[in-house]
Image: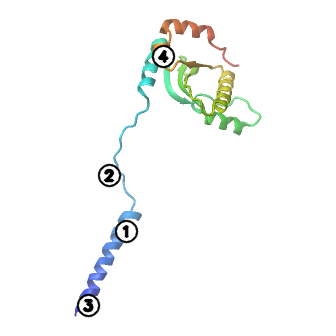
C-alpha cells in the first residue's frame, strides 16, 4: 500500500510541475498583467531649447528628435537602396516645418566631444549634403539657450539663410 501512495504523490507532483512549466513557458498571455512606465523623451536642456525654437518660429511646427527617414524621401539616386540606408541612419535634434508640414530648417545642438571627431565631422558633412539637396537648411545651435540670440534676431538671421526649395 505504501508504494502505491508514493507513486500517487509522485504522479501528482509530476502533473503539478507539468502545469507549472506549461503556464510559465507555453501559454500565450493576454498582456493584461503587463505594466508600463513612461520614459524621458527629452532632457531638460532639450525642452528649454524646444521652447526657444517655438518662440523663434511661433507660427510653425517645431519637432524634436526627428530621423531623416521621417522627413525626407529619395528623389533621385544612382543606388536607391544605399541612399535610403543613408537617410535611415541619420537624425537631427530639431526640425522646423512650414505650413504644409515640410521641413525648412534642421538643427543639431553643438556637442564638444573629442572622441572620434574625424568620423563625426564626416557624418555631419554627409548629413548637411543630404539636407541641402532637399532644400532644408542645416544649422547648429549653441548647447545652451543662454548663449543664443534673442528669438526675433535669430529668426531674422535665419530668414536670410533659408535655402530655395528643390524642383
Secondary element at tag 3: helix
Q: Mark 1 or mark 4, which has the lower sequence index?
A: 1
* Label 1, label 2: how far apart the Cα atoms are: 19 Å
**Viewport quadrant of the N terminus:** bottom left
Q: Where on the picture, by quarter, is residue 162?
A: top right
Q: Which residue is mark 2?
A: 33
The x, y position of residue 73, in whole percent, is 64, 30
Q: Are marks 2 and 4 in contact (CB under 8 Å)?
A: no
Secondary element at tag 2: loop
Query: Mark 4 Cα within 10 Å, few/some/many (few <14, many 20+)?
Result: many
Is 121 left or right of 110, judged from the image as shown?
right
The x, y position of residue 44, in whole percent, is 41, 25
* Label 2, label 3: how far apart the Cα atoms are: 41 Å
Is residue 10 shown above or below 55?
below
Q: Where on the picture, by quarter, is residue 129?
A: top right
Query: Mark 2 Cα within 10 Å, few/some/many (few <14, many 20+)?
Result: few
Q: Which residue is mark 1?
A: 21
Q: Where on the picture, by quarter, is residue 138?
A: top right
* Label 2, label 4: how far apart the Cα atoms are: 41 Å
**Viewport quadrant of the C terminus:** top right
Q: Are marks 1 and 4 in contact (CB under 8 Å)?
A: no
Q: Which residue is mark 4?
A: 53
- Residue at 61% from the left image edge and 36% from the top image edge: 89
* Label 1, label 4: how far apart the Cα atoms are: 55 Å
Q: Mark 1 or mark 2, which has the lower sequence index?
A: 1
Q: Is residue 30 visible?
A: yes
Check the image and name the residue furthest to the right. 78
Q: Which residue is mark 3?
A: 4
Badge nearest the viewer, 2 or 4: 4
Q: Mark 2 or mark 3, which has the lower sequence index?
A: 3
Secondary element at tag 4: helix
Q: Mark 2 or mark 4, which has the lower sequence index?
A: 2
Amino acid at each position: 500500500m505504501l508504494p502505491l501512495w508514493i507513486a500517487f504523490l509522485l504522479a501528482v507532483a509530476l502533473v503539478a510541475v507539468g502545469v507549472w512549466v506549461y503556464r510559465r513557458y507555453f501559454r500565450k498571455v493576454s498582456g493584461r498583467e503587463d505594466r508600463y512606465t513612461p520614459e524621458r523623451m527629452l532632457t531638460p536642456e532639450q525642452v528649454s531649447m524646444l521652447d526657444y525654437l517655438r518662440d523663434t518660429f511661433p507660427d510653425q511646427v517645431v519637432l524634436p528628435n526627428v530621423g531623416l527617414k521621417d522627413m525626407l524621401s529619395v528623389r533621385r539616386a544612382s543606388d536607391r537602396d544605399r541612399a535610403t540606408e543613408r537617410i535611415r541612419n541619420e537624425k537631427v535634434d530639431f526640425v522646423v516645418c512650414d505650413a504644409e508640414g515640410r521641413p525648412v530648417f534642421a538643427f543639431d545642438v553643438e556637442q564638444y566631444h573629442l572622441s572620434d571627431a574625424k568620423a563625426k565631422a564626416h557624418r555631419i558633412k554627409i548629413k548637411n549634403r543630404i539636407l541641402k539637396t532637399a532644400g532644408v537648411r542645416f544649422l547648429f545651435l549653441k548647447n545652451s539657450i543662454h548663449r543664443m540670440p534673442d528669438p526675433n534676431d535669430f529668426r531674422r538671421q535665419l530668414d536670410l539663410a533659408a535655402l530655395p526649395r528643390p524642383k
